[in-house]
Image (spheres, rainbow, N blue to C red):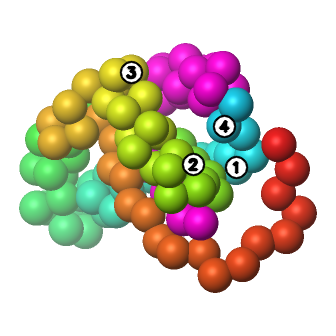
């Protein structure tokens, strides 16, 4: 199994993403509100003038992101990545999403 962590910047796409996962019988995601490091530091622009400039550069209108954790079988990893790309677009573009996966050695309590 794999733990997929998605930092979704296009939060307006979250419901569509989660509904599509459910349609494909992929469930058990946990969602947390999150904020990126540069955005957080840019709030202190009076202390660090460079971050005021960064705030201007990263001001996309998204104040927060959603971080989604999902335990998946190895076979589901590519499927979920493809679903995410279909909904938010090219992940290499800024302000879309970031995806990482980590191996899981064991699980308990996952019900779907």
User: Quarter holding the N terminus?
Assistant: bottom right
Q: Secondary structure at mark 3?
A: helix
Above or below, comparing residue 30 to residue 91 in the picture: below
In the rendered image, residue 66 lying in the magenta stretch gets the answer no
Q: Secondary structure at mark 4?
A: loop
Select label 4 or label 2 by which is in front.
4
Residue under label 4, please give it: 26
Task: Give, as a single range, the part of the protein colored magenta.
Answer: 1-24
Residue under label 2, please give it: 68
Residue under label 1, please give it: 30
Q: Earlier in the sequence, mark 4 or mark 2?
A: 4
In the image, 14: left or right of 8?
A: right
Residue furthest toward the bottom?
105
Q: Percent x, y for residue 105?
A: 64, 81
Q: Are dots 4 and 3 in contact, CB under 8 Å?
A: no
Query: Is 105 in front, or is 99?
Result: 105
Q: Is residue 9 visible?
A: no
Q: Earlier in the sequence, mark 4 or mark 3?
A: 4
Residue under label 3, please give it: 87
How crowded pointer 1 is (Cα within 10 Å; few <14, some 14-19, many 20+) is rated as few
Select label 1 or label 4 by which is in front.
4
Q: Earlier in the sequence, mark 2 or mark 3?
A: 2
Q: Are dots 2 and 1 in contact, CB under 8 Å?
A: yes
Q: Please report the residue visible at 51 percent of the width from the left and 58 percent of the height from the top.
A: 74
């Amino acid at each position: 199994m794999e733990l997929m962590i998605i930092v979704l910047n296009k939060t307006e796409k979250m419901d569509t993403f989660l509904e599509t996962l459910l349609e494909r019988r992929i469930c058990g995601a946990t969602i947390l509100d999150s904020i990126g490091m540069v955005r957080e530091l840019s709030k202190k622009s009076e202390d660090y003038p460079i971050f005021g400039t960064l705030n201007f550069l990263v001001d996309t209108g998204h104040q927060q992101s959603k971080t989604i954790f999902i335990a998946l079988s190895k076979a589901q990893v590519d499927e979920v990545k493809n679903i995410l790309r279909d909904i938010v677009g090219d992940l290499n573009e800024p302000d879309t999403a970031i995806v990482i996966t980590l191996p899981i050695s064991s699980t308990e309590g996952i019900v779907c």
